Amino acid sequence: MDRQPGVSVRVKLTLSYAGFLMLAGALLMGAVWVFLLSYVPDRAMLINPDDKPDGGVFPIRSVLLETFAPRAAAVMALLLVFGLVGGWILAGRMLAPLTSITDATRKATGGSLSHRVRLPGRGDEFRELADAFDTMLERLEAHVAEQQRFAANASHELRTPLATMQALLDVARSDPHRDTDAYVERLRAVNARAIDLTEALLVLSRADKQTFTREPVDLSLLMEEATETLFPLAGRRGVALDTSGDLAAASGSPTLLLQMTTNLVHNAIVHNLPAHGFVRVRTGVRSGNAMLTVENSGDLLSPRLVSTLTEPFQRGTERIQHDHAGVGLGLAIVQRIVHVHDGSLTLTPRADGGLRIAVLLPAPAAHPAEQYRKPISE
């Protein structure tokens, strides 16, 4: 916003300091003058020489005024100069932290997010502002770095299926004895992966924007819908799907929470043992919060690997070897959805292999039980 140039805050504070000092001086001079007037007569009065050794005439108001007024004016002028100089110095010292914050803000506007104000000294209003600004810069820098890393990874992941399709088309065009059906099937599989990745990116973007209406949701109903949808996949992969749970009331977007539940169950099914594995899904309440746990058998996972599974496009080597390895965004989407719903996500490797994931979501205000419903599929 363009603004007309105005008086600086330092000048305003200086004038304020000088003005208050002049006002205090004027009040003091006025009080002294009124006090003197109460003891000085308005006409000449002889005094008894016996009462006053040096004798003479008691001073009158006019003489006192001629003597007092010039000296009072000199004192007021001195106060004015002292107020302006002292106010300018004090205002500069007081506003120095604000100048540092302003400089840091201008650097941040120019795209530099690595600097910090770091005001020294004890806590006061300016230092609280500087600390809050440093915290904002730290979070903003981390967010921008994450977005840049995500954009680079997304570009790489999207480029892979597109390059694969281009290579298949080039080979098919140069192969006179090509099997058209085989090439079409491979192109269809690669294209389906690109579509899945694009849809996952859209879901992740929508979760980041937090543009949804909160309403009461029962996680047990979402669990039923998600497992019912994924039951055929579990059957084809020889995975036993075991579900049970009580009402787990939460508040949020039914669509996003269904996506979260589906991703967790799908992840547990896909990244499981080749045969005779299991997936257990439970819902309940813990410490007043809605809880959803998904536990699956599988390969042994190290704590270090588990700590990276919620990062976008992070897939362990042992996981990529499976069919339906996914696009590497399943748990990243889950983490974002849990975050925008003010919940917590905990990943724990099982001693016997596999993974246990627990989601805690804040319970909503009291609602009638019939208000908890399944989301309408879009």
Image: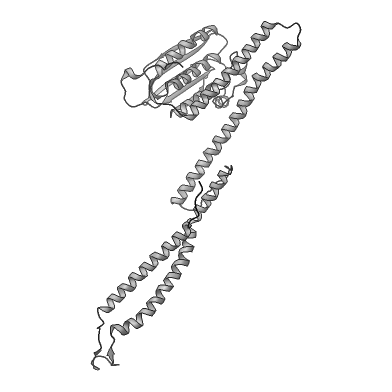
Q: Is residue 202 above or below residue 15?
A: above
Q: Give left or right: position of 354 versus 47.
A: right
Residue 182 sits in quarter:
top right
Q: Position of residue 306 (x, y in %)?
A: 55, 24
Q: Residue at x 41, y 22 (%)?
A: 291
Residue 172 appears in the picture as rendered: yes
- Residue 123 seen: no
Q: Nearer the viewer, residue 103 or 359?
A: 103
For residue 196, which quarter of the picture?
A: top right
Q: Position of residue 7 (x, y in %)?
A: 47, 58
Q: Is residue 17 left or right of residue 348?
A: left
Q: How are the colours assigned in the image? A: one colour
Front-most of 152 and 71?
71
Q: Is residue 28 left or right of residue 209?
A: left
x and y percentages locating residue 60 in the rendered image: 28, 85
Compared with residue 212, is residue 182 higher up or lower down, i.e. above or below?
A: above
Residue 374 in the image: above or below residue 100: above
Disc tally is 0
Q: Is residue 46 above or below residue 362?
A: below
x%, y% of residue 140?
53, 38
Q: Tell me the residue at 49%/63% (across/down).
A: 89
Q: Which residue does the image show at 39% across and 26% down from the upper left?
A: 214
